[in-house]
Amino acid sequence: MEELFSKSFLSILRRSERVMVSTGAGISAESGVPTFRGPGGLWNDFKPEELATPQAFKRDPKKVWEWYDWRRQLLAKVDPNPGHHALAALEKIVPQFFLFTQNIDGLHQKAGNKTVYELHGSIWQVRCTREAKPAFEMHENPISQLPPICGCGAPLRPNVVWFGENLPADITAMAWEVAKACDAFFLIGTSATVQPAASLPWVAKENGAIVVEINPEETPATEIADESFRANAGMILPQLVEALKNHHG
Ligand code: BJW
């Protein structure tokens, strides 16, 4: 039977000191979380400009919160899948491992990854829309009053990054720093269309990293990928981790 991973590919990964992983909604698809785009995607039923923008929130905070409350209820019921668990296992066998995610669902943390850099925030955190106070965890589920209200009387908002908003500056700077210095870069379960996260594989490639894509569909980043696995992350990642553990070349 033809091997899924070539010996030379496994040798490169085995020799990689610094591994960067960048995940998107597709890694959580096998947990039952809808992706944004493509079949069954969240955006098929909801227009992003109606829900994932600061303007939409200002216009109708209750409507935006109903969408987030629905997603929080769904997320509370799901568990990490074999793809998430394999990344937690990979963290243990790689000398320096960096996991960046566009996901806000918290499933990487639930799978056991120690440090997860959340580029688009967390659905489990909220912050005041008036006071410049730090975001905080809120796990009430479902939320009894929509929108939830801060002690100061202003609406709270989900601590996520909407279109037209800046990503957290420290995490973005860290992502660029790691992408420039990594030996191997994994792009997993993202359509690679939303900036600035979509640029990360190019940054890694330009700085000499091997770029590996895991996605059942092609994406704009496929053209620069050194290895593309056209399959589900939950199928490929556990086999890759096993193969790496057993590879001594
Ligand atoms: C599987 C699978 C399985 C299925 N296994 N795979 C430069 C150029 C052009 C535009 C811009 C630019 N800079 C900024 C912009 C504007 C904008 C942007 O990128 N727009 C594009 C749509 C063109 N970007 C922004 O506004 C960002 N801010 C910014 O850049 O600030 C500076 C700035 C401000 C103003 C002007 C200019 C600059 C912010 C982006 C915030 C994105 N927010 C969201 C919502 C977050 C909160 C929430 O979840 O509600 O983040 S949108 C949504 O898309 C969400 C996701 O994180 C993000 C990416 O989606 P992702 O993860 O890729 O999911 P999908 O569904 O697209 O793809 C899933 C993939 O999985 C598919 O490929 C499947 O095939 C695959 N898959 N099953 C593996 N089992």
Image (tube, grey):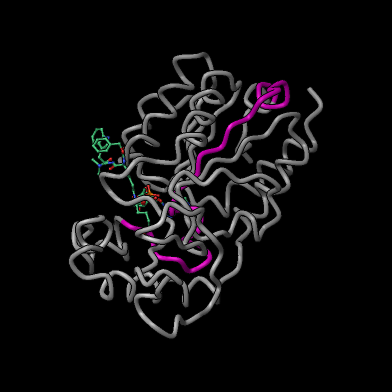
Q: Residue at x 51, y 39 (%)?
A: 22
Asked if the magenta segment contains residue 83, the reply would be: no
Tell me where residue 198 appears, x and y as whole percent.
Answer: 37, 35
Tell me where residue 154 appears, x and y as whole percent.
Answer: 35, 68
Is residue 224 positioned above or below 238 on the image? Answer: above
Q: Residue at x 66, y 21 (%)?
A: 12
- List the single residue furthest toward the front: 152
Tell me where residue 102 appears, x and y as whole percent.
Answer: 45, 47
Choose top left, top right, bottom left or bottom right for residue 225: top left
How many numbered marks are there?
0
Along the viewing direction, whichever of 2 and 154 lies nearer the viewer:
154
Asked if the magenta segment contains residue 30, the reply would be: yes
The C terminus: image quadrant = top right
Q: Residue at x 53, y 35 (%)?
A: 186
Along the viewing direction, whichever of 70 and 38 lies nearer the viewer:
70
Tell me where residue 171 appears, x and y as whole percent.
Answer: 51, 36
Is residue 145 positioned above or below 196 on the image? Answer: below
165 horizontally vs 141: left or right: left
Choose top left, top right, bottom left or bottom right for residue 60: bottom left
The N terminus: image quadrant = top right
Is residue 184 positioned above or below 87 on the image? Answer: above
Q: Which residues are magenta?
A: 11-36
Along the viewing direction, whichever of 157 and 25 lies nearer the viewer:
157
